[in-house]
Image: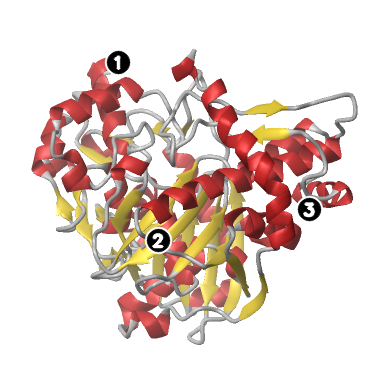
Amino acid sequence: MFLGIDIGTSGVKAVVLDEHGAVVGQGTAALTVQRPQPLWSEQDPDAWWQATTAAVRAIDPAVRRAVRGIGLAGQMHGATLLGADDQVLRPGILWNDGRSEAECAELEAKAPDLHRIAGNLAMPGFTAPKLLWVAHHEPEIFAKIRTVLLPKDYVRLRMTGEKASDVSDAAGTLWLDVDRREWSDDILAATGLTREQMPQAVEGTAQTGKLRAEVAEAWGIDQVPVAGGGGDNAAGAAGVGVVKDGDALLSLGTSGVIFAATKEFRPNPAGAVHAFCHCLPNMWHQMSVHLSAAACIDWVARLTGTPGAAELFARAESVGPASGPEIFLPYLSGERTPHNDAEVRGAFLGLDHDTTPERLAQAVLEGVAFALADGLSVLRDAGTELSQLSVIGGGARSSYWGQTLAAALNVELVYLKGGEVGPALGAARLAQLAVDGGSPEEVCAPPPVSHSIAPDAALAERFAPKIARFRDSYSRITPRNR
């Protein structure tokens, strides 16, 4: 059996797969995000460790004892700063933190080859601009930095004592030469860092040490190997068989992602498209990334006093798609693709005396779908043609939302059995590849199809004027135009 651990933003999920790929155990533990100032988003790295231990220990002890390998997935881009003796110097700065926009412009000026090497624009979400911010605003902390780790790799350090990062996650720092799959000394130098402060860059299927004896004892697991793993989206792709050129998925987690596997490095920074390494050797991928997706569902549920996402979907369905004039712009944490705008914030437009909580819920489902359609548009502009997307993440539980998404995106959505397990599933499969070897196409075969949703042409036609208003509204609310 193989254990996959996903260190997410809202919680840690642990799953165990048997040798046939069936889920035989699961555990979860919640996390919270701290926002001490506008644009800031932070977490305590020790909270990742405590939640990881709680999630693993929630699995049946007999299942844990049979585990032969562990894989890690995790939220990308987070800056975990360690000093002497690997002590944490400050709270981790997360992927949806927007404080470093000025530093992005500085990095672009200092590293003129950034787009060619890293394949991406400098955005506040990435790790490198965060380090420039620390250098400028917390120089006493910057001077103490001995190692910079991503969130899942800090958990790896606590598990194994090893400092390593797989190339799919490392690509999200901006410090990686994505085509060559190794650290770039030039971009590191532009942020005042060196290769010695980076973990070892490895493939997702590589072994990166074994569980320390005290951790193995506490978890009730042998001292098994730990695989390199993957950034959350790459691991999620491995979990649902998105491993060949042209395969693609839609991830509906806290953020929303359209992920397309590619057989070569295919950057398109002009459209704010991400081009990263896959967590499988000799593969890359493109992504459009939206900072708020299922997070918007949780937000509007709290706003309207709705007890949970399932009830919110039911309330939206009671009024139906395109049922009112309300437009929701889902930029609660800013936006990446296609706008690269850390300061824009969400908005409701078109409210009237007849607006109800049900129509607000429906507007939020539509607003996230329209933002994802914007992202798919720039992927298509880059030459990536997609007619089908496998759906993963917590948002995959709602077929009703799927009808809205399929019509807005004009693609068929394929729902896979177990797809809601998400990146932890792929992390477990990477552990299997690290321990037993084998072909990624065989080990990471797609789960059985639960159902699919084809785009409804009539609904797409009803959405067309709302999408046009949605796209026009962004230019009216961004601080860039004030």
The amino acid beneath tag 2 is: Ala
- Residue at horizontal 22 percent and vertical 61 percent from the top: 202
How many numbered circles does the render carry? 3
At label 1, which amino acid type do we have?
His
Q: Secondary structure at mark 1?
A: helix
Query: Where is residue 430 shown, x and y percent of the image?
Result: 38, 71
* Front in this rendered view, residue 293 or 40: 293
Quick check: can you spot residue 398?
A: no
Q: Please say if 434 is above or below 274.
A: below
Q: Which mark is residue 310?
A: 3
Tell me which numbered mark, 1 or 3, is placed earlier along the sequence.
1
Q: Residue furthest top?
A: 482
Q: Residues within 10 Å of mark 1 (few under 14, many from 20)?
A: few
Tell which circle, 1 or 2, labels the residue nearer the N-terminal end. 1
Quarter of the figure with residue 223: bottom left
Mark 3: which amino acid? Ala
Image point 55% across, 29% down: which residue? 474
In depth, the one of 108 and 379 nearer the eye is 379
Percent x, y of residue 241: 45, 75
User: Taking 349 as reference, is 319 above or below it?
Assistant: below
Looking at marks 2 and 3 on the same chain, the residue that comes earlier in the sequence is marked by 2
What is the C-alpha distance between the residues marked 2 and 3? 27 Å
Dot 2 corresponds to which residue?
A: 234
Question: Residue 100, percent across and down?
Answer: 35, 24
Position of residue 145 relative to residue 120, above or below, is above
* Residue annotated with mark 1: 137
Residue 266's image quarter?
bottom left
Where's residue 253, x and y in %? Answer: 57, 51
Q: Is residue 353 visible?
A: yes
Which of the two discs, 1 and 3, sits closer to the camera?
A: 3
Which image quarter: residue 422?
bottom right
Q: Relative to 156, is 455 on the left or the right?
A: right
